[in-house]
Amino acid sequence: TNNTERIKIKSEQDVYKLKQIEEIKDKVQEHLIVIALNSKNYIDSIELVAIGSSSCIMIEPIDVLRCAIVRGSKGIIVAHNHPSGDNIPSKSDIEFTNRLNGMAKSFNLELLDHIVIADENLSMKGKGYI
């Protein structure tokens, strides 16, 4: 969506308040959202890039980065929900985040955070995964 009304992201708390994040919290399938940001951390776009099963999403890092690359964004925040309500990143969440971070750097993009939306939201950057 492009109706982002020049929202600036200063912390993960700002991400948690976005309506697109609130909308995926109670979904029964995992949903992956990419928030593309400019160099001053204003939102360029918010895109739902994948819907998976109740426990996983199959997607390649390039598919996550595509909208940010096309828009010339400088950074991204990725968020996905855990329908179980458990906020602990899975092994595949951690591996995917590492792959995504490496690929983002090769496109001169910064992966600013990967957020797990659950009963209690979790910032993977805040927990030291990024």
Image (cartoon, rainbow, N blue to C red):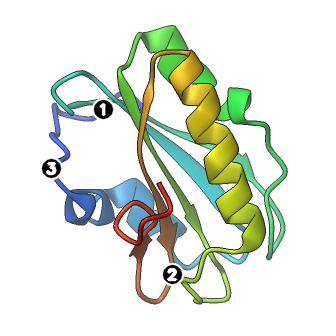
Residue 48 lies in what quarter of the image?
A: top right
Residue 29 visible: no
Is residue 42 shown left or right of residue 22? left
Q: Which residue in the structure is indicated by mark 1?
A: 3
For the residues marked 1 and 2, what is the alpha-carbon distance in whole angstroms?
25 Å
x%, y% of residue 86?
A: 59, 89
Question: Hey, what amino acid is under mark 1?
Answer: Asn
Judged from the image, the secondary structure of the residue bearing numbered disc 1 is loop
- Locate residue 11, reporting x and y percent: 20, 57
Q: Is residue 25 above or below residue 60?
A: below
Under mark 3, the amino acid is Lys
Residue sitting nearer the eye, 115 or 103:
103
Q: Residues within 10 Å of mark 3 (few under 14, many from 20)?
A: few
Tally of numbered discs: 3
Give the residue at mark 3.
Answer: 10
Q: Crowdedness of circle 2 by 10 Å Cα count: few (<14), some, many (20+)?
A: some
Give how far apart the Cα atoms at labels 2 and 3 are. Answer: 21 Å
Question: Which callout, 2 or 3, points to the residue nearer the camera?
Answer: 3
Residue 26 point in image, percent of width and height: 56, 79
Name the amino acid type tagged 2. Ala
Q: Residue at x 77, y 64 (%)?
A: 92
Front residue of 29 and 115: 115
Instruction: Identify residue for label 2.
Output: 118
Residue 87 image offset from top left, x and y in percent:
54, 83
- Which residue is painted at 34% across and 67% down in the image? 126
Q: CA distance from mark 3 to mark 1?
A: 19 Å
Q: Secondary structure at mark 2?
A: loop
Where 29 sits versus 32, above or below? below
